[in-house]
Image: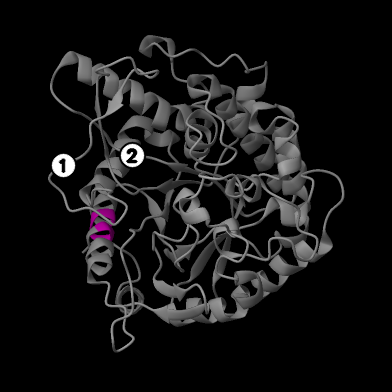
């Protein structure tokens, strides 16, 4: 069965930041630092999903999806990231999972979507090897409660983005600016992934994935310098997080003027390369890379993709990039590539209801139509794709952009929390009804 779904993340939608025993996360701390998030927005309330989850499950059922990808809030389950378990936090996910199952919607649970308990950050965060072991312990707690009803698990969401923005550039929580000194964060996240896979297998989990943000990388020109810079960027963004998991080894970083990872210990790569049941791929846009023109701390610079329409975020809309990416992964990894699940794909638009109350987001309809067609083309070329999840079900807290970027199939009026399904919601419902998969061999 092909999985049609939508995706969300705990900090972006749940709210209830201090209720029922939830501890603080790095995002609670980050949003309270002046200038970190646009307009001073926080996720304290967000979409109030913690209280409105039943309404949101009804929206999922009305959409006609057969799966829902959500993330579990680590500080809601373990307020200090280790030690005592907050049963009220687990109870919330129990209720949510039961409601999804009652509607015939396959729960797909992400264990870590960037909201690290602040208590663990105070002990070093992902710069500390111990955090990988804490992830495994937390995974065992959650899986013991939910693995009997959750058939699909994702260990980490976009470890590259969390490393780059959270520890390298400082634009996301926890806000460190370490540049290439952040590379140990990559290894510790991947080690945590491997240990979490082991914990999930012990609990009898049916399917286990890792979700990586992947991008086709284009050199800005035919020059050797731009080609070398593009290869370096591809190595850091794509291969650094796929190679160890799929091939059991890190790519050679020294060839691109990048320091190696000195955090690797004997046996780590065997843990990281635990067999997976699928690779989650989040795709939004390609990346065009040039050789650095100045004294940049990195051996490349983003040259920008031109000649395509853009989203409200300024991201170029290139549907065929999804086909290129998936076909490229199949060519690079061959039989080592497990089945693929597109675990996020979507666009931000300046959506507001018209005078008639309708949110007519035709640009999102075109975006989804183009990318689903590209997904079908990749499947026609032999890529084994098992699912497609739209980001996102709801307009939500978009990290450092606060509530200024709307990705939802459902419009949320944040002051009142009124939900209004958009034209894209109705389009996707009709599409799912008429096509059981993006490509069926016709």
Above/below status of 181 relative to 93: above
* Separation of marks 1 and 2 at Cα, in angstroms: 16 Å
Query: Residue 222: percent from the left, percent from the top?
Result: 13, 21
What residue is shown with label 2? 215
Question: Quick check: 199 left or right of 156?
Answer: right
Among numbered discs 1 and 2, the one appearing first in the sequence: 2
Whole-percent x, y for residue 12 in the image: 54, 59
Residue with the most extreme right position? 84
Asked whether residue 335 is drawn in magenta, I would say no
| Residue 152 appears in the rendering | no
Residue 253 against residue 185 in the figure, above or below: above
- Please give the residue where the numbered disc 1 appears in the rendered image: 306
The quarter of the image holding the C terminus is bottom left
Mark 2: give few (<14), some (14-19) or many (20+) Cα within 10 Å.
many
| Type of secondary structure dominating the magenta stretch | helix
Query: Which percent across, then down, holds residue 50?
Result: 65, 70
Residue at the image point whose x is 27% and y is 41% from the top:
286
* Labels 1, 2: front one: 1
Residue 191 higher or lower than 22, as above or below: above
Looking at the rendered structure, the secondary structure element under dot 2 is loop
Please give the count of numbered marks on the rendered protein. 2
In the displayed structure, would residue 259 be above or below residue 38?
above
Q: Horizontal placement of 316 versus 412: left or right?
A: left
Q: Quadrant of residue 421?
A: bottom left
Q: Residues within 10 Å of mark 1 (few under 14, many from 20)?
A: few
Magenta highlight range: 371-375
């Amino acid at each position: 069965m092909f999985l049609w779904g939508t995706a969300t993340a705990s900090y972006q939608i749940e709210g209830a930041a201090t209720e029922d025993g939830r501890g603080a996360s790095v995002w609670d701390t980050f949003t309270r630092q002046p200038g970190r998030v646009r307009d001073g927005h926080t996720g304290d309330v967000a979409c109030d999903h913690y209280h409105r989850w039943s309404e949101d499950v009804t929206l999922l059922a009305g959409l006609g999806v057969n799966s829902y990808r959500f993330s579990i809030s680590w500080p809601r389950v373990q307020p200090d990231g280790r030690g005592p378990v907050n049963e009220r936090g687990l109870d919330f996910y129990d209720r949510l999972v039961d409601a999804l199952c009652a509607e015939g919607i396959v729960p797909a649970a992400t264990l870590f979507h960037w909201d690290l308990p602040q208590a663990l950050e105070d002990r070093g965060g992902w710069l500390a090897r111990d955090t990988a072991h804490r992830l495994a312990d937390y995974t065992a707690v959650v899986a013991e409660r939910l693995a009997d009803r959750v058939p699909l698990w994702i260990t980490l969401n976009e470890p590259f983005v969390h490393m780059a923005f959270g520890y390298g550039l400082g634009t996301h929580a926890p806000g460190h600016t370490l540049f290439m000194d952040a590379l140990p964060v990559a290894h510790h996240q991947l080690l945590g992934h491997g240990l979490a896979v082991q914990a999930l297998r012990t609990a009898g989990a049916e399917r286990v994935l890792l979700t990586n943000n992947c991008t086709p990388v284009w050199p800005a020109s035919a020059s050797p310098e731009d080609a070398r810079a593009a290869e370096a960027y591809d190595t850091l963004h794509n291969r650094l997080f796929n190679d160890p998991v799929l091939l059991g080894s890190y790519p050679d970083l020294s060839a691109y003027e990048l320091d190696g990872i000195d955090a690797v210990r004997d046996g780590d790569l065997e843990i990281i390369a635990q067999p997976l049941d699928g690779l989650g791929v989040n795709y939004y846009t390609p990346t065009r890379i040039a050789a650095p023109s100045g004294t940049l701390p990195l051996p490349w610079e983003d040259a920008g993709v031109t000649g395509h329409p853009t989203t409200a975020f300024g991201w170029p809309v290139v549907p065929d990039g999804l086909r290129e990416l998936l076909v490229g992964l199949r060519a690079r990894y061959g039989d080592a590539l497990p089945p693929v699940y597109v675990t996020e794909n979507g666009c931000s638009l300046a959506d507001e209801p018209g005078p008639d109350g309708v949110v007519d987001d035709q640009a999102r309809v075109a975006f989804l139509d183009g990318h689903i067609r590209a997904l079908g083309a990749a499947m026609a070329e032999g890529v084994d794709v098992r699912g497609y999840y739209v980001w996102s079900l709801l307009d939500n807290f978009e990290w450092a952009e606060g509530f200024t970027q709307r990705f939802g199939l459902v419009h949320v009026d944040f002051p009142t929390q009124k939900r209004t399904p958009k034209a894209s919601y109705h389009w996707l419902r009709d599409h799912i009804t008429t096509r059981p998969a993006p490509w069926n061999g016709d």
